[in-house]
Image (cartoon, helix red, strand yellow):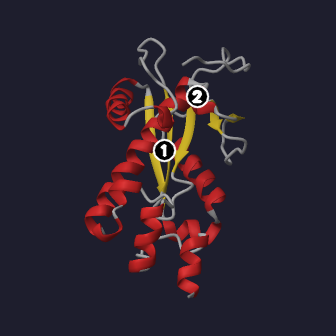
Amino acid sequence: MIDDIEIDLKNYRFVAGVDEAGRGPLVGSVVAAAVILDEENPIEGLNDSKKLTAKKREKLALEIKLQAKSWSIATIGPEVIDEINILQASLLAMKKAVEALVIAPDFALIDGNKLPDLSCEAEAIVKGDARVKSIAAASILAKVERDQQMQDLHKEYPQYEFDRHKGYPTKVHMALLEEHGPCPEHRKTFGPVRRLLEG
């Protein structure tokens, strides 16, 4: 895992990496995280959260929370996602995560190709979670938080087996959605859910 971006960040004191988890699922919140790493206290093994096992992600999430200069997590719930759409909800979650950092960053590196509305300078980096350590750290925090939320939802609505598919439109999820109908946490504007509600 290397920082392979062509941006000179030497003039910036606090650089935050920002990423989100949960754009694709049919249920629950979209979660964003922002992380300012401490270069004098490096964390080994940072990578795109999708390339790590759940156990490794959880271990790294603890290290990030202990060793980063600053970190924060923000969530936007399904009602807001339905109201403003998933892209806008993702950008809003990222904005809130950056604003919640105890140390205000003077530059933010955002995963993807769109920038949230931030008060500091920022750059969008495609596949940033596989290229930039601070974005990878943010992707891990966001994914671990989102997975925990799905475990909690599973306890509330065990009939959907959210612990297995994490809300993604898998065959199992689609069959259970068909059988039980949507729960209050399902995103009502997402195609499969909307079609069921429209009958």
Q: Is residue 162 visible?
A: yes
Q: Left of 40 or right of it: where is 116?
A: right
How far apart are the alpha carbons under marks 2 and 1? 24 Å
Who's the residue at 33% across and 62% down the image?
Answer: 161
Residue 42 position in % (x across, y down): 43, 15
Binning the other alpha carbons within 10 Å of mark 2 as few (below 14), some (14 to 19) or many (20 upward) gives many
Q: Amino acid at mark 2?
A: Ala
Residue ranking furthest to the bottom = 199
Check the image and report above or below for 177 versus 21.
Answer: below
Check the image and report above or below for 34 versus 168.
Answer: above
Residue for badge 1: 100
Residue 105 position in % (x across, y down): 57, 32
Q: Amino acid at mark 1?
A: Ala
Residue nearest the viewer, comparing 60 with 94:
60
Q: Secondary structure at mark 1?
A: loop
Residue nearest the viewer, comparing 161 with 71:
161
Who's the residue at 49% across and 37% down the image?
Answer: 50
Binning the other alpha carbons within 10 Å of mark 1 as few (below 14), some (14 to 19) or many (20 upward) gives some
Check the image and report above or below for 79 versus 37.
Answer: below
Q: Nearer the viewer, mark 2 or mark 1?
A: 2
Mark on residue 130?
2
Residue 84 position in % (x across, y down): 64, 67
Q: Is residue 185 visible?
A: no
Q: Are marks 2 and 1 in contact (CB under 8 Å)?
A: no
Answer with mark 2 or mark 1, whichever residue precedes in sequence.
Answer: 1
Residue 108 position in % (x across, y down): 63, 33
Residue nearest the viewer, comparing 3 with 193:
193
- Quarter of the image that includes the N terminus: top right
Who's the residue at 65% across and 58% down the image?
Answer: 88
